[in-house]
Amino acid sequence: MPVGFLMTSTSQQFNIQMPETPVVNATEMMRILDSIARDRKIDRSVLVKDLEQAMVSAARKHFSTLDTEEFACVLDPLSGQLKLTRHGEPLEMEPVEFGRIAAQTFKQVMIQRFRDDERQSVMDEFSKRIGDIVTGTVQRYEGGALVVSIDRAEAFMPRSEQIPGEQFQPGDRVRCLILDVRDAGNQVKIVLSRSHPDFIKRLFEVEVPEVAERIIEVKAMAREAGYRTKIAVSSIDSKVDAVGACVGVRGSRIKNIVDELNGEKIDIVRWNESSQILIQNALKPAEVAEISLCFELGRATVVVRDDQLSLAIGKKGQNVRLAARLTGWDIDILTPEEFNKGLEVMSQTLLSVEGMTEEKVDRLAALGMISVFDLEEVGAEVLLTELGLDKTVADKIIEVAAARAKEVAIQQQKDKEEAARKRVEDEAAARLLLEGDGSATAVSGDAAAAAILGLSPARTPTEPTAPKPTHADEQRAADILGI
């Protein structure tokens, strides 16, 4: 007799539609196996072996035997007929006579083995899809992690892989990257990401056919998820403009990607094998005046005009930080005044050492060492190999440079504190004068300071006359300035 009646409770665990009677024939049993194999994407032959093993377990339970070789079971995959043997001889007893306890054992073994097979199937399928973009349905949040249903599995997106500020509601469709697949014992954990740089790379492959066809290659990428991304691209076809193809007609292609990322800024940079040109491109939209590379330190000193300084650095240093990660160089942004001052201090320090000449100083500058701090960091070995100096002279230069670097650092700190104090003074003075006379709309720093101190600086006829500060104003300004 076939074992279809034992499949009833098992199939219910897997949401398979069953007939009203608990006893089914061999054909119905095989239909259930086919349904499970199709819905759970499990090989049918594996399910057949599971059923055979479950029947052996039921027989051993009924006869209370520990011998694993005593019983054997073979199921005909076409007819569904079951052949159960004991010590190689056909078992006279029909499976239907095993009873309730044996049937319960059969059910438990089948469910466990089916779940193991399904878990392995999910593991095999999604392990091959790591790095691919999938679209899933948001289910819920669990401890900050977003649970997403993709195909026949549940995946999760840790808070660290979410884009800051993004929020989803149950039922929302979300596109994300399969970052990792882990075997966590009784379940498979599929890790998703929207903040990983590869997510943007895959979006470019979807939106830009030339990227998917490898005509345009993504050479490097740096991202701060939710804020800004820099991506360097190049084309293997001289007829295809890499940047133009990624942007699209009137920005259509890049707009789709930006919309997917909820407004995250994307800078498309033209790749160049020359580090100087690449750094210059990476710092756009700022205009670069000069770039000095120090290969010993892996540092690039970039000189920009005063009006380009804030643009090159970016909001909270974001532009220069992303450019550094994109190019692989440690980037310092200096104004021409700062650059020249550093060179001048280094030149004066080195020329004070016997054996150093202006030619050798120029040689160091050409190697990208433009301050005493650089000399202190690279050490004497570079001076020996690049300038051919004696070890005694090289050690002396490093010693003098280190001492001078400490002095410069102290002076820079004092200048910084003085600038901060001056800024506080100007702000306090301007605030006091505006409070004293609502008609005053603008006061220069010098005039404000003079007003606090009770002085009368020269002014042009077009300058507004500042109200004479009262004793209370003077006292309040003194409190702000700490005097």
Image (tube, rainbow, N blue to C red):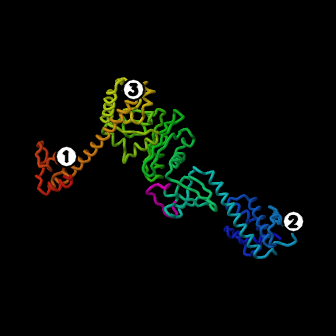
The circle on residue 363 is 3
- Quick check: 291 left or right of 34? left
Label 2 vs label 1, nearer the camera: 2
The answer to which quarter of the image holds residue 276 is top left
Q: Nearer the viewer, residue 482 or 78?
A: 482
Q: Label 2 amino acid? A: His
Image location of residue 118, percent across then percent down: 67, 61
Q: Are the residues at dot 1 and dot 3 in contact (C-beta closer than 8 Å)? A: no
Q: Are the residues at dot 2 and dot 1 in contact (C-beta closer than 8 Å)? A: no
Mark 2 or mark 3, which has the lower sequence index?
2
2 magenta-colored: no
Q: Label 3 amino acid? A: Arg
Would you name the residue on which mark 1 appears?
Answer: 445
Task: Judge the density around disc 3: few (<14), some (14-19), many (≥20) Cα neighbours within 10 Å.
Answer: some
Q: CA distance from mark 2 to mark 1?
A: 104 Å
Q: Label 1 amino acid? A: Gly
Image location of residue 249, percent across then percent down: 46, 43
Element marked by disc 1: helix
Q: Quadrant of the N terminus?
A: bottom right
- Quick check: 116 left or right of 169? right
Tell me the magenta residue range.
160-172
